[in-house]
Amino acid sequence: MKLVEGKVAIVTGAARGIGEAIAIKLAEHGAHVAFSYVSDASAAKAIALEEKLKALGVKAKAYKSNAGDFAQCESLVNDVLKEFGTIDICVNNAGISKDNLLLRMTPDQWEDVIKVNLNSVFYMTKQVIKPMMKARNGAIINMSSVIGEMGNAGQSSYAASKAGIIGFTKSVAKELGSRNIRCNAIAPGFVETDMTSYLKEGEAGDKYKAGIPLGRFASAEDIANTTLFLASDMGSYITGQTISVCGGLNI
């Protein structure tokens, strides 16, 4: 059974890691997928992912676009609408971290993280709700973090951006529920991606895993499975919620 068959999904920051896993999962369940990547260094991976998605029997296209730039988000959504006709699912996944103790954090470091992690969610959501309101249907999934719920030393900018996503998600859900547009957030814990590879081994990895009741880091597919659930009709009565996929880290 394909849970999102025939739907059109847009996923930001999907050239690798969680975003890539989400794009593949949605395509496996029948969704046509448009996805963005930001750097020339990611172009080869993006093209490879596009071909992989097409091999699953769906329409797919990669777009170079900076989610932290309003004009580029507007162009991205317009291009996707021209190519795919509509947008049923939006996954705001693009994100970065520039960790530093507050005493040492520069204004530029702070602003870069807020721009990419939080502003991008506003930029993309503002654009995709237009076709969703017209269709009176849609699912928006915003990638927050368990750090946005708990905080973490050295990650004040990251925590602030991810906490902001949670408040934004709740507000959008209240605004758009009457139009049958659902907006939810996912708060992953530690996920096995390139960004966390340095945490997986040795004493550091053991220390972090000791604080997780399930005793392991999440896989990117764990996050993709939750995204699929929220994007599909299985999550049709869920909106304004933050689902923590963290192995119990935030208990």
Image (cartoon, rainbow, N blue to C red):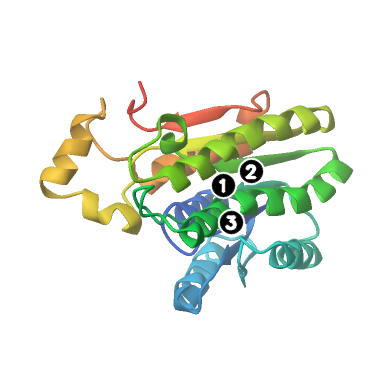
Element type at marker 2? loop
Between label 3 and label 1, give the one nearer the viewer: 3
Screen quadrant of the N terminus: top right
Q: Amino acid at mark 3?
A: Lys
Is disc 3 placed on a helix, strand or loop?
A: helix
Give the vertical position of 50 relative to 238 (above or below).
below
Mark seen at residue 246: none
Residue 174 image point, x, y percent: 75, 27
Please tell me which of labels 3 and 2 falls first in the chain: 2
Report which residue position mark 2 lands on. 4
Query: At 71% from the left edge and 65% from the top edge, which residue is drawn?
Result: 76
Q: Which mark is drawn over residue 29?
A: 1
Q: Residues within 10 Å of mark 2 (few under 14, many from 20)?
A: many
Are the residues tagged 2 and 1 within 8 Å (C-beta)?
yes
Q: Residue 5 at x, y = what percent?
A: 65, 46
Identified by mark 1, the residue type is His
Where is residue 241, by image quadrant? Answer: top right
**Is the residue 154 above or below the residue 229 in the image?**
below
**Which mark sits nearer the N-terminus, 3 or 1?**
1
Position of the C terminus by quadrant: top left
Q: Residues within 10 Å of mark 3 (few under 14, many from 20)?
A: many
Disc number placed over residue 115 in the picture, else none: 3
